[in-house]
Image (cartoon, rainbow, N blue to C red):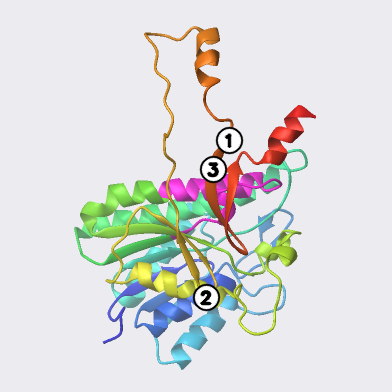
């Protein structure tokens, strides 16, 4: 029997890139899939109307056709996850087409790289609307459905954060903040929805897609090489299928994925503590904190593999010192 036989999944932003790979992989393992994709390019900071993109292609319909041609079941949804009612329509379509919902893969995203100095309000609103609000909206409507139905085993939420969501980098303020928010939201979902039979986890993929290629440094971080290409989005999908399947034993965790490498992130931890007698005088607090390290050693998982580094990095402290 297929690993996900009888399951119903939704994948947002599934017209291309990671989402397309996830939708095809879920279907190949037996799930019926709602393929969500807005189907429009982004102009002037706001998505165009639903339908064919600027190349005249209805991306959601193309992926649906691929799944059906392979013997699977799929329907298209072209709503924007950033619209509260649009997000609800994705869940409604799953119920209408396939009778229920078991798996939610929040993948839809957009990237407008900018520093805190140069970013615009439109940049900020678009990034947070699609990533954080969109993920929250889909999770909300799925959770509301599951709460009405009562506990059922085998439900799963897989959210998409980013390596720069858990280890932020310069020139990506709204993107990093939204992706960090998604990681936190995942932990919330895991705690709130466990009693409904839901496991909630997040993936932080390092893969070469149209969205991440909007960042100028990606070509250097994800070079194209002969032979095995570790940065193809296809390599992330087995982890998504695992997290959606009965094989998964995790919840409330963040996983990194790049080619054949899968990382499990350690959450924030209060490793240091200073304690006084009552309210701290500021000067005494400064003296107590002087014994603590300015930097924390971490193992970051960026494109290219895991590295030992420090937060904040040395260049940040060097910048303060001139």
Q: Tell me the quarter of the picture where residue 277 sits.
A: top left
Instruction: Say if residue 76 shows up in the picture.
Output: no
Task: State the SS at label 3.
Answer: strand
Question: What residue is at 50 percent from the left and 54 percent from the top?
Answer: 134
Q: Quadrant of the N terminus?
A: bottom left
- From this view, report whether residue 7 is shown above or below residue 145: below
How far is the residue under mark 3 from the one under mark 1? 7 Å
- The residue labelled by disc 2 is 235
The residue stretch that appears in magenta: 159-185
Judging depth in this view, the residue of 163 and 71 nearest the camera is 163
- From this view, report whether residue 204 is shown above or below residue 18: above
Q: Earlier in the sequence, mark 2 or mark 1?
A: 2
Instruction: Say if residue 39 shows up in the picture.
Output: yes
- The residue labelled by disc 3 is 297
Query: At which x and y percent is residue 253?
Result: 39, 54
Query: At which x and y percent is residue 288?
Result: 50, 16
Q: Residue furthest front?
A: 291
């Amino acid at each position: 029997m297929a690993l996900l036989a009888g399951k119903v999944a939704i994948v947002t932003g599934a017209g291309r890139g990671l989402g397309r790979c996830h939708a095809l992989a879920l279907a190949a393992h037996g799930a019926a899939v709602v393929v969500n994709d807005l189907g429009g390019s982004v102009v002037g900071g706001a998505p165009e109307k639903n339908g064919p993109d600027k190349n005249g292609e209805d991306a959601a319909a193309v992926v649906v056709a691929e799944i059906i041609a392979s013997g699977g079941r799929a329907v298209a949804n072209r709503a924007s996850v950033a619209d509260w009612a649009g997000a609800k329509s994705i869940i409604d379509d799953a119920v209408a087409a396939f009778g229920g919902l078991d798996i939610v893969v929040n993948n839809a995203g957009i990237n407008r790289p900018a520093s805190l100095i140069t970013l615009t309000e439109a940049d900020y609103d678009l990034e947070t609307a699609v990533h954080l609000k969109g993920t929250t909206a889909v999770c909300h409507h799925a959770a509301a459905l599951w709460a009405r139905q009562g506990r059922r085993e085998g439900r799963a939420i897989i959210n998409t954060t980013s390596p720069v969501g858990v280890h932020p980098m310069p020139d990506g303020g709204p993107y990093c903040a939204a992706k960090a928010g998604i990681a936190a939201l995942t932990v919330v979902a895991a705690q709130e929805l466990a009693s409904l039979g839901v496991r909630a986890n997040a993936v932080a993929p390092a893969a070469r897609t149209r969205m991440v290629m909007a960042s100028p440094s990606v070509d250097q971080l994800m070079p194209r090489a002969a032979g095995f290409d570790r940065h193809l989005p296809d390599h992330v999908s087995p982890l998504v299928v695992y997290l959606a399947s009965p094989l998964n034993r995790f919840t409330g965790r963040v996983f990194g994925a790049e080619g054949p490498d899968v990382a499990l992130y350690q959450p924030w931890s209060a490793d240091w503590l200073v304690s006084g007698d009552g309210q701290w005088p500021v000067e005494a607090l400064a003296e107590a904190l002087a014994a603590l390290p300015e930097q924390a050693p971490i193992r970051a998982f960026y494109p290219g593999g895991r590295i030992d580094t420090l937060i904040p990095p040395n260049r940040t402290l060097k910048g303060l010192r001139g």
